[in-house]
Structures are given as structure tokens and as C-alpha cells.
Image: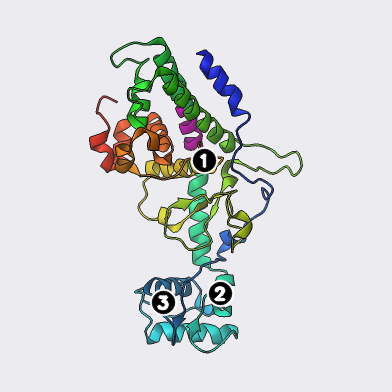
Amino acid sequence: MSKPLAAGIAKEVAMQVRAHTENACVVYRFEGGVSAWTIEKSVGVGGFNRKDDVLKIQQLLNKIAPGDGGPLPPLAEDGLAGPKTNGAIRAFQQFHRVASDGRVDPGGPTLKRMNEVPKQGLAAQNAARLARTAQAMPALLAMAQKAIRGAESAMDALSLGGSGLTPLTRPFEIADLYFAFGKQSQATTLSELRFIRTTFVRVKGVLASRISPLTGGNPFGVSIFTIDPLGKDWMAYSPMQLGDDRREIPEVHSGHVYLCSGLDHGVVPDLFNHILMHELLHFVDDEAKDRRIVDHGYRDKAMKLPHSLRMRNSDNYALFASHLHIGRTRLVASQPSLQPHVPANL
């Protein structure tokens, strides 16, 4: 191993992981079907009735069992505040004695109660999402380990020289594919490969099971992941530390990766693992301006970024790890838009 790598290992100790572990043993209430969905404008009788807000209320009502005041039959989820939606709002209000005006206001008592009612269907979806995430943990750890070894091998190849695609040069060719080092100096590329390695060392560190000497709990590992309480239709997200002390929902903070409902629909296993790795790369980002890993582009768009943005783009790191873990064939099968950007010989 080259001397610059040893220097890089020493630097890893000083880098801070963007994670909060003081809540390691808390069972989050949102995982059991309680929610914290929000709307921007009022919905229902006399409401502003933005389509997105109406749709969210319809979906929320449909997740509530009839025995808890939910509609029977379920509402059409069309984003239109018609008589049936307004009637379902009023019926829910009367069932729970929070109002009777048929309108849901942002932050009002009706929405608060809709969120508070445990929802069996939502709880089942949450449990399935968490179970799938737990099953993905060995693959995520393997991805991080292969990315570490890939960066190390790329540094060796660069230091030792060589030409043509060989077992020694292949890791560097794959790294160059996703980070586009170009004609910059060898010293600069080695430094950036050390940073890539360090980033995946940190990912591996938070994935590893660790026992807390104070609580016996596991502050890292699968407990990093929890359920998005806000009803986002995204795949997943990892909040930045900035603003943690001002969040409307205090349980949503930078100490977790939040799993959203978008993961439940047609996401094949290789893509599922890639998405989780993508968010873990945000999670370990210490948010220092010169080291921040953000989102400049996904999949094929990530492959079109200039080098400087690739070094700060989460998906380029995740693509590097995914490629090393599953190979080109499976990577392209799970993300077809990558096909023209990933050479067949890699």
C-alpha cells in the first residue's frame, strides 16, 4: 500500500460522522402507523383545495380504518374535493369530536387527529419496508467494503503505473469512469482517491453493529434507517444537521435515513440497495463546505457531470460502489439509462 494511503487513514480519525446516536434505543412512534403528514392549504368545505393537499388528505383518510372514523367505501384518490371527500372529513371530525365543519386546516386539530390515529395498513407497509432494509444490510456492508478495496487498488494502480485493462488497472478504470479524473496531476488524483476511500470507510463504520457501553443499544447498523413520518412520495432522504434545532417535527433530524413510500413500488433489489447506499453517503457527510456530498445528478445525469461536481455528488459514489459489488450487467439492468455510459468491458 502506498504511503499517501497511510496518511489518508490517519486523517479518517479526525473526520466527523454526521450522525446523532443519543436516541439509539428509541422505538419511533411513526413506525407503528402514526404519521405526521402536513398540508400547505386548507382542504374541504370552503378550503383552498390545492390538488396535492386534497390528495394527501384522501390518502390519509383511506389509511384510517372505518372503525376509527375512516371512510367506507374508500375515497377515490383523485385530488378533487367533492361531496364524498368533504363528507368523509366531516364524518371523521364528528367521530373524534374535533369539529364538524368539513375542513382540514394546516396544523389544525382535525389533521392532528388524523395523524394520531394508528393506521394498520400504514403500519404493515412500514414493517415491510423496514424488513426489506434489514435484509439489505449485508449487501450494503459488502458494497462499502468493495468500494474501499476498489479505491485502494486504484491508488496502487496509479502509483505503480501500467497500461491496458488488467486486474491491476481495472479498479482505476472503474473509478475514473465515475469520477472522471482526467489529466490532473497524479498527486491530486491520489488525494481524491483517498477521500473516496475515507468516505466508504465511514459508511462501513456506521453500518457495523456497535454495542453502546451505556445502554447496550445499537446506535448504528440497521437502526440508522427509520420510517418517513411526513408522507413523502420520495424514495428516501437524510436531513442535514443545519436546522435540526428548528424542525417542526423534532423526530425528523440528521441522525437517521428516512425511508419513504416510493421504495414500495417496483424498486428491484439492486436499485433498492443503491438508493440506500446513496443516502448513507449523505448520512456520513460532515457538511464541511469543501467536503460536502450533495445531489447534482442521478444515474445518466451523474455521468455527464464535470469532475469537480462528481467528487461532490452522492450518486457517483453510489454508482462506483454498486458497479464494484454487482458488476456492469446487473447495474445496467437495474438502471437502464446507464447503458450508453458504462463500457461493456468494465
Residue 289 shows up from this direction? yes
Residue most toward the bottom? 100
Check disc 3 and give the amino acid type. Pro
Q: Nearer the viewer, residue 60 or 188?
A: 188
Q: Quadrant of residue 297?
A: top left
Q: Which residue is mark 3?
A: 74
Between the residue at mark 2 and the residue at mark 3, the CA separation in whole angstroms equals 24 Å
Mark 1: give few (<14), some (14-19) or many (20+) Cα within 10 Å: few
**Magenta segment main secondary structure:** helix
Which of pointers 2 and 1 lies earlier in the amino acid sequence? 2
Q: Is residue 195 rendered to the left or right of residue 164?
A: right
Q: Residue 289 — which label?
A: 1
Tell us which disc is closer to us: 2 or 1.
Answer: 1
For the residue carrying disc 2, how many other residues have a C-alpha within 10 Å: few (<14), some (14-19), or many (20+)? Answer: some
Q: Nearer the viewer, residue 15 or 215?
A: 15
Image point (57%, 44%), residue name: 222
Q: Residue 13, how many percent across, how many down?
A: 63, 28
Label 3 secondary element: loop
Identify the secondary structure beneath mark 1.
Answer: loop
Span colored in magenta: 137-147
Question: Three-letter amino acid code at disc 2?
Answer: Gly
Question: Which residue corresponds to the image point at 64% horizontal and 46% vertical from the top-left?
Answer: 20
**Which residue position is annotated with label 2?**
107
Q: Residue at x 53, y 51 (%)?
A: 239
User: What residue appears at the point 34 percent right and 40 percent down from the top-left corner?
Assistant: 302
Q: Are marks 2 and 1 in contact (CB under 8 Å)?
A: no
Residue 191 at x, y percent in the picture: 47, 23
Return the residue nearer the eye: 46 or 183.
183
Q: Find out whether residue 24 is within the magenta segment.
A: no
Q: Position of residue 317 (x, y in %)?
A: 42, 35
